[in-house]
Image (cartoon, grey):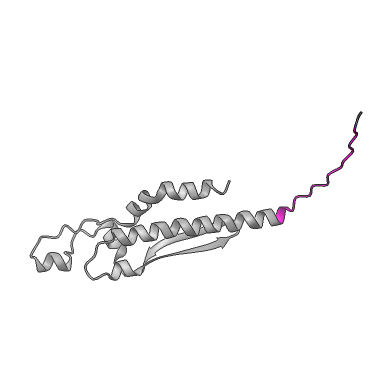
Amino acid sequence: MAIKVDAKFDVRLDISRLLSVVSKASLDATEQGLQLIERQAKILSPYEFGTNRRSIGHEVKATSSGPKGSVFTESGYGGYLEVGTGQRRSATEQKLNLKGTGGPTRFMFPAFEMVRDAIVAGFKNLV
């Protein structure tokens, strides 16, 4: 006994839909990665009054070349904390009559370093 099967499959790939799905997934992965960095930066931010910590945020935008995003602080002095000024003492240092270093109290870059593997894993899950 022989069975003969003659089948034709018409497979059409909707490229624009596929690109839309991939674009949305990469935007979501970027959003999640920046949320991780933001959370960790808030934990690491030097704390006296909480102004810098409360001002840390992130934003993600879809662009023609893919998602773009940033983690930022709007305190007005977060950049000085990150890179140092070499002069100013903190309010706590002044109160306790301690000599301020004016050096950096990094919180943004270490936050990225601490969550880098999780961000990479999030993007690997796209593929």
Q: Quadrant of residue 5?
A: top right
Image side of residue 90 versus residue 24, left or right? left
Question: Magenta segment, principal secondary structure?
Answer: loop
Viewer-closest of 70 and 9: 9
Image side of residue 96 versus residue 15, left or right? left
Q: Position of residue 59 (x, y in %)?
A: 46, 65
Q: Is residue 100 shown above or below 11?
A: below
Image side of residue 119 versus residue 88, left or right? right
Q: Position of residue 28 (x, y in %)?
A: 53, 58
Quarter holding the N terminus?
top right
Q: Identify which residue is drawn at 30% across, 64% down.
A: 78
Viewer-closest of 74 and 12: 12
Q: Identify which residue is drawn at 42% across, 46% down.
A: 117
Q: Position of residue 103 (x, y in %)?
A: 21, 56
The answer to if 1 sits in the magenta stretch is no
Q: Quadrant of residue 3?
A: top right
Q: Which residues are magenta?
A: 3-16
Number of dots carrying numbers: 0
In the displayed image of the protein, which residue is found farthest to the top?
1
